[in-house]
Amino acid sequence: YSEYWDEYKKFVVIRNPWDRFYSNYRYIKMEENYYHYNSSITAFKTPELHPQNPNYKSGESGFYRKKRPLRAHFELKDKTFEEYVDYFYYNMGENIDDVIITKLQKFFIHPEVKTIRFENLEQELSNWLQKELKLPTINSSPSLTPSPYTPELVDKVEKIYLPDIKILGYDRP
């Protein structure tokens, strides 16, 4: 793939940190989800360590978990949203599985890669490709009114994702 890498149009989809965090919480609350059934999950520390990246060096150990579900999906399943936020707020970075959930999106931003906001995905992607798209909706949740966030929880999630919020220009809810 490396000989074609520069020819590809590349983009990354980012998400509002507060929406992303609450979505993760709702996901672990589901009775059945991807992590209950898939035991072959592989995640990479950085895009540079992905085998399809032209800078990838064979034999590099870029994996931080393989073939095991996230601990949080089991240990935090029965917690309230406030307890879930507090867990990550008070234990940031102490467990590698937790880092996966709170992984900063800023590491995926690159000058040669188009950044598209998830909340405007179809429109921004259509504009960038100069082609009208109608993307299917596979996994969506209804908007919540009222918000599950108290002012204190907004502050805590802001501290967890502060670098993303600054770099990506998101406003507090």
Image (cartoon, rainbow, N blue to C red):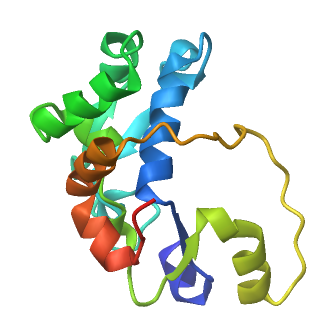
* Residue at figure coordinates x 41%, y 36% from the top left: 42
Q: Residue at image x 19%, y 35%? A: 96
Which sits in the foreground, 3 or 69?
69
In the figure, is residue 68 to the left or right of 35? left
* Residue in the foreground of this view, choosing between 121 and 25: 25
Apparent side of residue 136 relative to residue 15 in the rendered image (left or right): right
Q: Picture quarter containing residue 48?
A: bottom left
The picture places residue 116, in percent across and down from the top left corner, at 58, 74
What residue lies at 72% left-to-right and 39% top-to-bottom? 142
Q: Would you place residue 108 above or below residue 128 in this image? A: above
* Residue drawn at x 54%, y 28% as measured from the top left: 27
Q: Position of residue 104 (x, y in %)?
A: 30, 58
Front-most of residues 47 and 26: 26
Q: Is residue 97 above or below residue 110?
A: above
Residue 165, percent across and down?
A: 33, 68
Quadrant assignment for the N terminus: bottom right
Q: Position of residue 119 (x, y in %)?
A: 64, 63
The answer to whether residue 53 shows anywhere in this view is: yes
How many numbered marks, from 0 up?
0
Would you identify the image quadrant in which residue 106 lies?
bottom left
Q: Is residue 59 visible?
A: no
User: Looking at the image, is 34 positioned above or below residue 166?
Assistant: above
Task: Between residue 138 and residue 23, name the one nearer to us.
Answer: 23
